[in-house]
Structures are given as C-alpha cells and as structure tokens.
Amino acid sequence: MPRNRIFSTIFLVSLALLIGGNLPCLAASDFQTITTPELKTWLKADQKPVLVYTLSQVEFFEERIPGSVCIPTEQIKTSPALPKNMNTPIVFYCKGPG
Amino acid sequence: MAAGQAVDMGYHNVYWYKEGMAGWKKGHNLIESLNFKYAQRKLPDPIAPQALHEKLQSDPRYLLVDIRDKKSRQKDGLIAGPTEVLPLYRIHTDYEQLPDDKVLVFYDIRAKQAPAAIRFMLEQKYYFTHLTYLKGGVSAWKKEGLPVKAH
C-alpha cells in the first residue's frame, strides 16, 4: 500500500472516530422545546411531566403555572425536588419573552 | 440554563418551555398565586439611571441591592457605588441582611424582576419611601455610559 494511502486511511479513521465519538455527547446535551398548546395538553394527561419554575421563590409565590415546583437555576444540581428516575420528563420554564 | 444542567445530570427527557409565564398568560390559561394580594401592590416609582448616579455621589443613604445571578454580574459588571449583593432566589431567606435605615435601590438586568423584590420587602414591613428600583436595570445604566465595576 503506498505510503500516502496509509496516511490518508489513518487520517480518515481518526476523523471518523473523532466525529463518531463526539456525536453521542452532542445528542446527550440536547433538550427539546415545547409550545403552549403542547404543554397544556400534556398537563391534562395521566402521565404528566414534572414542571419546574427556575426563577426565585418570591416570583413563584406571585404567579406560576398550576402544578409547578420552584427550583432556581442556581440550585438545580443540589435540589431534592428533581425526580429520582432519570427517564421522568421534566419541563423547565421562567418568565419568557416580553 | 436549567434545562442544560438537567441534561448534564443525566436526565433523558428534558424540555424547555421557552414562552414561559408570558406565553402561558397570553393564551389566557389559568395561573396559580399564593400571594395574589401583594402581587397587586402599588410600587414606589423607579429611579432613572442619571438621577441614581447623582444620588450615589451626593446622598450616603442610598444603597444598591444587586439581585442578579452570578452569571449576569460577571457579564455586565456591577454598578459603581455602595452595594449589597443579594440574588433574588435568596431574598426570602436572607433579606434581614439589608438595613432598614437606607434607601434600598434594587436592580437587575432590565427591571423585570426588581418589582417582585420590592413587593416582598414591603411585605416584610420595610418602608415604602425607603425602597425603589433602577428604571431599565443595568442595561439602561450601561446604555447611558454610566460607570460599572468588574465583579
């Protein structure tokens, strides 16, 4: 096998590994967005998501979507209010635009 | 962002309701309120950036209360002047660290959250005349070229 071809094969294999190895990471760091009608329908279903308001408790007490829990963004990683089951759907929201 | 953090923690079904409270209310959907009565309270007038700048130079009673999170403080810096940093998510537990003999000027990024802080402080019996908030938040302050210091 000519030397050039060996090098190009090594290059292509490394590139494929690099991209392939990174893809699951990219997919894992993803979340989906949800619209108002979708959320409204979902909250009426039997299998509801956990709905999380991410601003302060002071604002949460003033107004919130019924059925929400309040976990400020700064406390997400330490909050006991998140579900134990990692497959449970969670919907996060805050004030929104405007 | 909260949704990103949840994904990092290993949650597999994470959603972001981007429209938030604004979108929910726009669709005339039901909301829940525990403190409806005080959510309707009249607010003291906000103070404009230039007027605040002058007060901070001339009146030692004025104390800034920065209610933003760490990320915003690092991004935009802090308004130059005597400051107490008390992020809004901690105000209900730590508000007593704020003096009641100063004029407390609450500020956030665009004055969207400061009103809630003020309504809470009024509920804790702080004087109406001793509370105000920066009109337009730190964004308006910077837009007018007024001084900020690094966090």
Image (spheres, grey):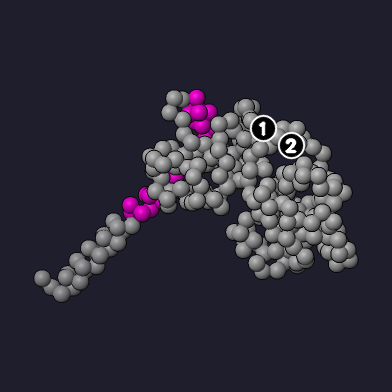
Q: Quadrant of the C terminus of chain B?
A: bottom right
Residue nearest the observer in this picture, B60 or B133: B60
The magenta span reads A23-44
Residue at 77% over, 59% down: B64
Of all residues, the one furthest to the left in this rendering is A1
SS category of the residue bearing label 2:
helix
Position of residue B16 relative to residue B136, above or below, is above
As helix, strand or loop, the secondary structure at mark 1 comes to loop
Please state the chain letter of the residue tagged with numbered disc 2 in the rendered image.
B
Please indicate, yes or no, whether residue B45 appears anywhere in the rendered image. Answer: no
Image quadrant where residue A70 sits: top right
Instruction: Chain letter for mark 1, please.
Output: B
Give percent across and percent down for residue B76: 66, 62
Tell me which amino acid carries mark 1.
Ser
> Which residue is pictured at 10% across the width and 71% down the height?
A1
Left or right: where A72 falls relative to B134: left
Q: Residues within 10 Å of mark 1 (few under 14, many from 20)?
A: some
Q: Is residue A97 left or right of residue B42?
A: left
Q: Position of residue B47 (x, y in %)?
A: 83, 53
Q: Which residue is mark 2?
A: B39
Residue B109, picture quadrant:
bottom right
Circles 1, 2 touching at the beta carbon (< 8 Å): yes
Q: Which residue in the protein does label 1 denote? A: B33
Figure check: B78 above or below A38: below
Task: Using the rendered image, report if marks 1 and 2 lie on a common chain.
Answer: yes
User: Does B138 sit left or right of A94 as displayed?
Assistant: right
